[in-house]
Image: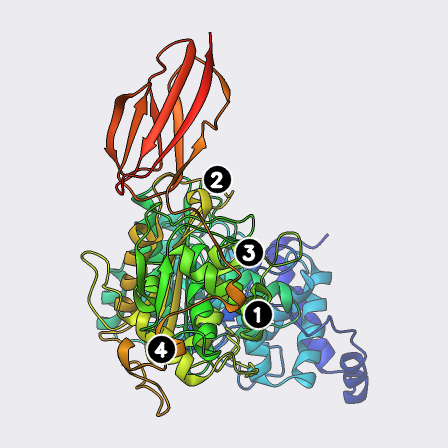
Amino acid sequence: MIRPGWRLPTLAAVFLFAAGLARDATDRWIDTTALPPLAVETGAEITARDGTLLRAFTVADGRWRLDPGPVDPLFTRMLIAYEDRRFADHPGVDPRAMLRAAGQSLLAGRIVSGGSTLSMQVARLMEDSGTGKLSGKLRQIRVALALERHLTKAQILDLYLRIAPYGGNLEGIRAASLSWFGKEPRRLTPAEAAFLVALPQSPETRRPDRFPDAAGAARDRVLDRMVTAGVLTAERADAARRETIPTARRDFPALAPHLAARLHAARPLDPRIETTIDARLQRSLETLAARAASAQSARLSLAILVADHRSGEILASVGSPDWTDDRRAGFIDMTEALRSPGSTLKPFVYALAFDDGLAHPETLIEDRPTAFGTYAPQNFDREFRGTIPVRQALQLSLNIPVVALTEAIGPARLISTLRRAGARPVIPGGQPGLAVALGGVGITLTDLVQSYAALARLGDPVTLSALATRDAQQGQRLVSPEAAWMAADILAGLPPPANAPAGRIAYKTGTSYGHRDAWAVGFDGAHVAGVWMGRADGASVPGAFGGDLAAPVLFDTFARLKAQPDPLPPPPPATLILPNARLPLPLQHFRPRGAALAKAPTGPELAFPPDGAEIEANGPLPLKVRGGTPPFTWLANGAPVILADRARETAMPTPGAGFLNLSVIDAMGQSATAKVTLRP
């Protein structure tokens, strides 16, 4: 066995002997070397529009190993000066360094320095060959000599920058710089560069999170050597020694984590996927989402999507307030989840009605109790406004008028329009009914924003995409520019939410049945954005309204996007801008085609309890009235029990078992009566 102190002298002698062999035998020995694979796997990267790293992924074995990218020249100079001064000149092995190391070992009786070149270190790292055995060292020499014949010096240095170990599962200069300093390696301080030069020599015993003193001492030795080598002045080295050593690893960037994961899953073989995401805006909106969610229930989630509707570029995509928060099911990307859109589809119904010549913003329309066959929708507040302009009906988000228009244009027409916009609505049961106008359809936030982008472009759809290399396809026009402009003009007339920054943004809010989803979607002359709030599991959020929850977040989104909204386009030349009295007679008052609507009775009708019902007399008796004009007065056996109540659903104390003559009288003096039996 060769004693440790004699390994390097013996190795040096072997090398010198080999160098004296016939040239052709040496060449043959090098040329027949079986090299390890030279292609080093690196983790996939998702980058923002400016090249900022949004998210990186580990390689198959769980190691962080990334493409080095630009590296600070100071680090490269320090690395070569410390590890391999004659790197540019030697053929892979440096005889002078080997002889120096051998002499030091003879004098000390142990290995003082290894004499390995950067090429030899690359050979060792690529094959994980040992350094303590003569056979391992000989193999490193042979591979290093062969590498020099197959690769340039720059390529060998690039391999080192990819695979040098930096502690734990960190490999390569970029993974190390991001993890230890939270920055790209293109701009390192002298202290940071010296630390990253020293760490690969003993990556586990010099880990600063475990052995900060050893890490600091190793860094300072590199700084001392750099002064001797003339790479640093003594003053810069002294200043570098005063910098603190990192004591913990930092998390790798995880901006737009849901989008990044989705893109990586769709293109798993792409080492780098460039996106249109604005890193500054993305970071700002993730902060906004976390802040808005923190003020609500611990299970409330939130999603935001922003795009440039002129180009189709998605600028920000927030899938949840915190993708690591299991309480909010943060791992679910709510920009891609199917939800009920509530009232947010109403503008498309109106735009289609305008396009068909059925209505105009100043057309009068009825908001009265109406039955559409067996379907009798109610307004959200259960109030009726009578005869009002279409503009007001949309701004108040009334249900009766929009259902009447939906019946006129056909619910299937609304669905096909959304599909032409690029959306993928899902219809419960397969066949669309009138309820689609009120949210009876499944749609994602991404598809809803996609649809509003077409409205913002005056009916001209565009494909939204976060890929930098995308095909911004345009599809078939949804509606005429005039119809789209009129719908947008109505939405632009909505006042902003309380305390929200003012601005001419066309927007619509929505709340799904049971308060499960709160929405706000809007646009200006350049951008479109959408906000969804609710629970990822679809549970109800009592008191959640789009106008209260989502609209303020939408306006904050635009405020973070830019200082002032871009102006909306002017009306197209053929737009009919007239008051109601000057409209063509068919446009002055909307009347359903073929008088298909069956009006409910003008007087009140007892919906519950019905006449002749038998009801158990335990607890309050629920009361419901249909039709009529509020407020309502309720009488039990001729005696008033509820006076001037505007609600259509209420309750009264049960008078006890027996017969009950129940009456309701509306504001017009019309009444309805039911005789019921209360059982004990």
Residue 191 is situated, as x and y percent measured from the top left of the image, at 32, 65
Residue 146 falls in which quadrant of the image?
bottom right
* In this rendering, position of residue 431 left or right of residue 66: right
CB-based contact (under 8 Å), mark 2 and mark 3:
no
The residue that label 1 is drawn on is: 413
CB-based contact (under 8 Å), mark 2 and mark 4:
no
The residue that label 2 is drawn on is: 539
Q: Secondary structure at mark 4?
A: helix
Mark 4 to mark 3 CA distance (whole Å): 25 Å
CB-based contact (under 8 Å), mark 1 and mark 2:
no
Residue 646 falls in which quadrant of the image?
top left
Judging depth in this view, the residue of 115 and 74 nearest the camera is 74
From the viewer's perspective, is the residue at label 2 or at label 3 nearer? Answer: 3
The residue that label 3 is drawn on is: 441
The residue that label 4 is drawn on is: 486
CB-based contact (under 8 Å), mark 4 and mark 3:
no
Residue 625 is situated, as x and y percent measured from the top left of the image, at 39, 36
Mark 4 to mark 1 CA distance (whole Å): 19 Å
The first of marks 1 and 2 along the sequence is 1
Q: Is residue 133 visible?
A: yes
Residue 482 is situated, as x and y percent measured from the top left of the image, at 40, 84
From the viewer's perspective, is the residue at label 4 or at label 3 nearer? Answer: 4
Tag 4: residue type?
Met
